Amino acid sequence: MMQTRVFITGSGIISAIGQNVDETLSSLRACRTGIRKIKHLQTVHRDEFVAGEIDLSLDELMHKLGVYSESYTRGSLLGMIAAREAVTSAGLKDINEARTGLISSTSVAGMTRTERYYKELFENTKHLGCIDTHDCGDSTLHIAADLGITCFITTISTACSSAANAIMLGARMIKSGKLDRVVVGGTDALSKFTLNGFHTLMILDREWCSPFDDQRRGLNLGEGAAYLVLESEAEVKRSGKPVLAELRGYGNANDAFHQTASSPEGFGATLAIRKALAVAAMEPSEVDYINAHGTGTPNNDLSEGTALIKVFGDRAPLFSSTKAYTGHTLAPAAGIEAVISLLSLKHNVVFPNLNYQNPMKEFSLVPVTGLLEGVKLDTILSNSFGFGGNCSSLIFSKASA
């Protein structure tokens, strides 16, 4: 039997602005960024760039979780922290009481460990075991084992839209009747590979990023993890539990323009947003706020802004990017911004686009630049656009089962 509605019953998050949902909300309301000088990542660029680094060492993360083994990468540990919080907040006592799956996403995977020993592997086999942690599925398996999920486990890696596509696949699994509930999201840790890679692309800002500003210079990298618990309408009614929101719509499209850049015309972003609206059976005018992808790169912000005008016209809804808080966390970005969107819905608050000063010359769209409280918010669009033209959009609405 086809399920028509998908509800969100739990959420969990860890990022540079908080180690759980409550800490995250506190930082957002205080307009407090987590982007600062690099402390834990061992890189020659540590004094050159700022990043959204979580102020916990690998040992401290293990201690926080009560696990002690070299088999756990930083990404796995971050994912376990966020996934545990999501499951706890959803009130799941017996994870296998219903058909429960895990769809996790990552882009860095286990590179934080393998890059440490790469050169050494040519000389001896002391750390040969680290190769097993390099695969994208390694963190997923650790999270699944920690939660006790066995019914359905898979990993998605579609660059910066990864967690959005994990959420989308989870919803489709529920609607098709294959699962009753799914833990969905993503995790990534800062690595030398990604820092060096984005530096080579010349899209890193050495200071605090400024999304949608005419003088924007690039992005700040970040790290973190975030997960949601999605449940079917039937499962929510059976348990009688409260819901955080409803996942109304989702859409994925491909720009097919360039390996790393989005098309200046915003073709992929426009298609993704329109698909999400179509799935939600909603008109653009019904969207109250947009949590924009807004990386702070010249290419992304122009492409996304152009797409917003194509879909919403010159009178776009309230919008802002929250990446100046957390940094761009890559795969989990959509999960982190989904949790932030849920907080906006719950508290009727729009968190500002930090560091914005100069309107872009290409269009008249201006993001929210100050904390807005008491705003009537019923529906939020959250955008996530990645390398390879991977564009995804999600629509969240207030709902009661």
Image (cartoon, grey):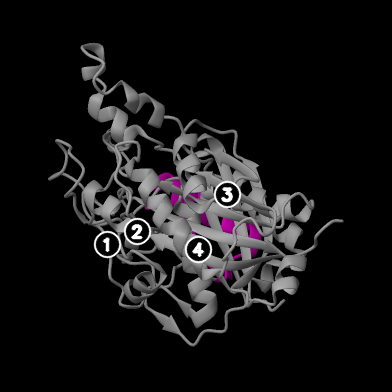
Tell me which label, 4 or 3, sits earlier in the chain. 4
Residue 329 image position (x, y, % from top left): 38, 50
Q: CA distance from mark 1 to mark 3?
A: 32 Å
At label 1, counting other C-alpha atoms closer than 10 Å, the crowd grade (few under 14, some 14-19, many 20 or more) is many
Q: Which residue is mark 3?
A: 149
Q: Say whether residue 295 is visible.
A: no
Q: Which mark is residue 34?
A: 1
Helix, strand or loop at label 4? It is helix
Is residue 27 depicted above or below 141 in this figure?
Answer: below
Identify the residue at image location x=55%, y=60%.
Answer: 228
Callouts 1 and 3 close, C-beta under 8 Å: no
Magenta residues, start to end: 290-317
Q: Tell me if residue 381 can be seen.
A: yes
Q: Marks 4 and 1, Cα distance to the nearest angstrom?
A: 22 Å
| Mark 3 → mark 2, Cα distance in angstroms | 24 Å
Residue drawn at x 31%, y 21% is 128
Q: Residue at 32%, 72% (x, y): give it.
A: 27
* Pointer 4 or 2: first along the chain: 2
User: Going from the N terminus, do you reach mark 3 or mark 2 first?
Assistant: 2
Answer whether labels 1 and 2 touch (C-beta < 8 Å): yes
Q: Which residue is mark 4?
A: 86
Question: Label 2 sits on what residue type?
Answer: Ser
